[in-house]
Amino acid sequence: MRAVVVYESMYGNTHQVAGAIGTALETAYEVSVVPVSRADPALLDAADLVVVGGPTHVHGMSRPGTRKGAVEAAGKPDSPLKAEPDALGPGLREWFGTLGRYPAKAAAFDTRLHGPARMTGRASKKVAHLLRAHGFELIAPPESFLVTKQNELEPHETTRAREWGATLVASSTPSHSRQ
Ligand SMILES: Cc1cc2nc3c(=O)[nH]c(=O)nc-3n(C[C@H](O)[C@H](O)[C@H](O)COP(=O)(O)O)c2cc1C
């Protein structure tokens, strides 16, 4: 069985979470973890499980303008942030526009600031909505992983991402859920 984890990431946090989820999925799947810039829609044709995540920007999914702002912030001389190589490429919002319909199982995640979701917003809610609109069967509620105000993943979030990945294995593979 195949699983694909597609991520969008400006500063590497969502990338890191995607990697941890991918590691957990390897107990049951042949796994590809790919940035959205390399997520050819054909990759999804052979996937039994598709997990999609991105950063929360302005309470939702990123837009070209917010990604440009994120890269510019990292380019400032005193900035500790480092932009991912494909940060200025297409985001998940544009990628969904290229997709057809898929019968696979799926789940959505995001990264966002620590705080009540009604204050911070969360990109995963819209990602889940778009997955459903493209025919995917959602097997888990959207999940958020938290970053600090300094844009670093909070301690234990990669562990939590691995644990969340394990719950996706349990709910997508009947043999694993019986163990
Ligand atoms: C332009 C911009 C807008 C943001 N807006 C929000 C927001 O509305 N809510 C929030 O929780 N975090 C917001 N953030 C913080 C991001 O969620 C955080 O940078 C991201 O999760 C880090 O993931 P990444 O390293 O994969 O880019 C924003 C960040 C940027 C750069």
Image (cartoon, rainbow, N blue to C red):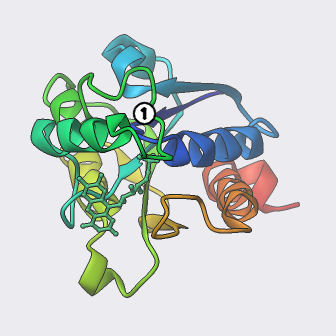
Q: Which residue is mark 1?
A: 83
- Image quadrant of ligand 1 equals bottom left
**What residue occupies the far front of the structure in this picture?**
77
Front-most of residues 171 and 129:
129
Residue 148: x and y, percent? 52, 69
* Residue at 20% over, 43% down: 69
Q: Is mark 1 within 8 Å of ligand 1?
A: no
* Residue at 37% over, 26% down: 36
- Dot 1, crowdedness within 10 Å: few (<14), some or many (≥20)? some
Q: Is residue 140 above or below residue 99?
A: below
Q: Is residue 16 above or below residue 125?
A: above
| Quadrant into which the C terminus falls | bottom right
Front-most of residues 139 and 128:
128
Q: Report if residue 134 is visible in the image.
A: no
Find numbered disc 1 in the image and state the secondary structure of the residue it sits on.
Answer: loop
Q: Report if residue 114 is visible in the image.
A: yes
Image side of residue 131 versus residue 5, left or right: left
**What residue occupies the far right of the structure in this picture?**
179
How many numbered discs sit on the rendered protein?
Answer: 1
Front-most of residues 86 and 102:
86
Residue 88: x and y, percent? 27, 25
| Quadrant into which the N terminus falls | top right
Image side of residue 140 versus residue 118, left or right: right
Dividing the picture into quarters, in which one does residue 6 lie? top left
Residue 130: x and y, percent? 21, 48
Image side of residue 122 versus residue 66, left or right: right
Dividing the picture into quarters, in which one does residue 23 lie? top right
* Residue at 42% over, 39% down: 9
For badge 1, the amino acid type reads Ala
Residue 127: x and y, percent? 28, 52
